[in-house]
Amino acid sequence: MTVVETLFLVLSGVAVFSALLVVTTDRVVHAALWLVITLGALAGCYLLLAAEFVAWVQVLIYIGSVVVLLIFALMLTRTPMGPGSAQNTGNRFLAAGVGIAATAGLGLTLYAGFHGEHISIKDTPVGTAGSIGDALFNDWVLGFEILSVVLLAALISAIVLTKSGDDR
């Protein structure tokens, strides 16, 4: 086992462990901080896979803005943050079963789709801005445009929902 493979296993273990803590902790702010660790470990995995551009996008966009925005939203609202502040319902076991079934389904789909495939990162520049731009605007342009319309609709919906009754 090489050093890169060992680091990848360690970072992926940290990502899985901290992701489990995100969904199981009782404190909302702690969940957001565990999310920072999860996303940081994923950025490290991207760096080890020679996808530097994707790793920096992960750090700048997700850790640098999304999680910080989430933490500020939690702190500026009157959200209960103490132990037991997470809303627990009687559907915990049903939700766990659905999560396990979805994980198994995704794993089987990935196994069926990529069984026997070997991806060599030495042949092509995988994570460069040029290769991502070429793939995004040549192969995935329709999905990219649909995603931008969905995000625009979510932004407009958020603005409409946050307006008070007098402003409408």
Image: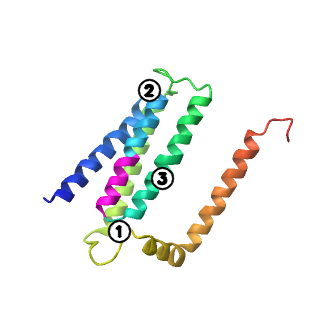
Mark linked to residue 26: 2
- Left-right relation of 63 to 107: right
Kindly indicate the quadrant of the structure image that contains residue 142: bottom right
> Does residue 120 show up magenta in the picture?
no
- Three-letter amino acid code at disc 1? Gly
- Three-letter amino acid code at disc 3? Leu
Pinpoint residue 39: horizontal percent, then vertical percent.
Answer: 40, 48
Pinpoint residue 34: horizontal percent, then vertical percent.
Answer: 40, 37
Question: Depth-wise, is mark 2 or mark 3 nearer the camera?
Answer: 3
Sequence-first tag of 3 and 1: 3
Question: Depth-wise, is mark 3 or mark 1 nearer the camera?
Answer: 3
Where 125 sits versus 161, above or below?
below
Task: Report which residue position mark 1 lands on.
Answer: 113
Looking at the image, which residue is at 56% across and 32% down?
A: 74
Neighbourhood count class around disc 1 (C-alpha, 10 Å): few under 14, some 14–19, many 20 upward: few
Q: Residue furthest left?
A: 1
Q: Look at the numbered disc 3 and give the secondary structure of its residue.
A: helix
Q: Look at the numbered disc 2 and give the secondary structure of its residue.
A: loop
- Left-right relation of 82 to 118: right
Pinpoint residue 37: horizontal percent, then vertical percent.
Answer: 37, 42
Task: Report which residue position mark 3 lands on.
Answer: 60
Question: Depth-wise, is mark 2 or mark 1 nearer the camera?
Answer: 2
Looking at the image, which residue is at 33% across and 59% down?
A: 47
- Total numbered badges shown on the rendered structure: 3
> Does residue 46 show up magenta in the picture?
yes
Mark 2 and 1 residues: CB-CB less than 8 Å, in contact? Answer: no
